[in-house]
Image (spheres, rainbow, N blue to C red):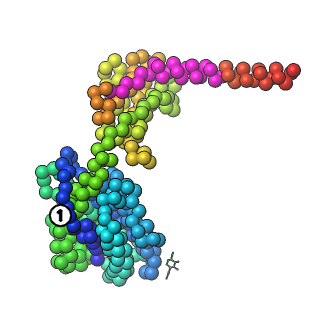
Amino acid sequence: MLLLLLAWLVALSLGWNNTVVLKERVYFQIMQISSFYNHSWAENWFSSWLGELQIDRWDSELNTLVFLQSWSRDSLSHKELVDMQTSLHAHFIRFTEETQTFAHKLQLEYPFVLQVASGCELHSGEASVGFVREAYQGIDFLSLENNSWLPSPQGGSRAQQTCQLLNSYEGLKERIHWLLSDACPHFTLRLLDAGKEYLQRQEKPEAWLSNGPSPGPGRLLLVCRVSGFYPKPVWVTWMRDNWEQPGTEQSDVLPNADGTWYLRVTLEVTAGETDGLSCQVKHSSLGDQDMILRWEHHSSVGFIILAVIPLLALLTGLAFWSKKRW
Ligand SMILES: *[C@@H]1O[C@H](CO)[C@@H](O)[C@H](O)[C@H]1NC(C)=O
């Protein structure tokens, strides 16, 4: 029942001729979130992802795919797109109907949310690995392991019963096996090929220094922000005279809205012990030319601004006052 999800991939089983050479592992997945409010009302959200890059989402008002990357749209013929949208639309209708039909038998209690992630992971020179994972009410429910449905321990008897039901559909298992091990990797390679210019681009980071909120009396939090770089791998740290500072703390590498990445690296120091400190950035777009930002420079600029602002305020005040007087 829950598995027609992959049906749309079938639409893409034509004309593969790929020239992509995989350098690292890459995965493609589709995600579906379905909220069932009562036995007659449900909503579906759907999106596809190439690694961490969102490719598209489903518009359930218009029953069309909205592409977030123009190259992925351009890689499909008009017929392929229409077929894909038709099978997705049919899938959502059947998925909703069948889940509603089995909800009572499988003890699914309204309101409930199902989340399904499925796709394949490709490694260079290795067979691709397909996966399907499903969650019920935000908790792991079941997954596909070695071509059979396995209940998650957290899923309880509900998950066991669902897996029993799913495992009885032999034809479905075969179809999913084909989709995950054959159609999905081919489709992924095709996407990688269509998007290679975009996916292999290099964008240089910008970096700047600032003071964070004071961690305590006599202490400073030095903040180095690095943003706008692509691809994601980056190395940023606080250095003192060529020595990496052990107290450096890194945020996660977070996405910007334009598809580039952002990172914040901090160091807590004693005020007055900032001599020789710098933030160093290594990134593929910079080649061997590391970006180095020295704290002294920053703090003197900060000092000048701090000194100038009150002066400006004073002068403005004086000018205003003398104008009034005259
Ligand atoms: C189902 O839920 C929807 C949305 O909350 C509501 O408008 C509708 O009246 C409900 N139907 C039934 C039969 O409870």
State the residue in front, 81 or 234.
Answer: 81
In this picture, is 52 found above or below 11?
above
Residue 296 is inside the magenta segment: yes
Q: Position of residue 135 (x, y in %)?
A: 33, 65
Count of numbered labels shown in the rendering: 1
Is residue 200 one of those drawn in magenta? no
Q: Residue 22 location, x and y as percent?
A: 19, 48
Secondary structure at numbered mark 1: helix
Residue 100 place in picture, x, y as percent: 37, 80
Farthest-out residue, right: 326
129 up-or-down from 114: above or below: above
11, 90: nearer the viewer: 11
Residue in view at x 38 percent, y 35 percent = 205
Residue at image location 38% in from the left, 42% down from the top: 261
The amino acid marked with disc number 1 is Ser
Q: Is any atom of residue 137 visible in this view?
A: no
Question: What are the residue bounds of the magenta stretch?
Answer: 290-310
**Residue on which the image places disc 1:** 181
Q: Nearer the viewer, residue 62 or 281?
A: 62
Figure quadrant of the N terminus: bottom left
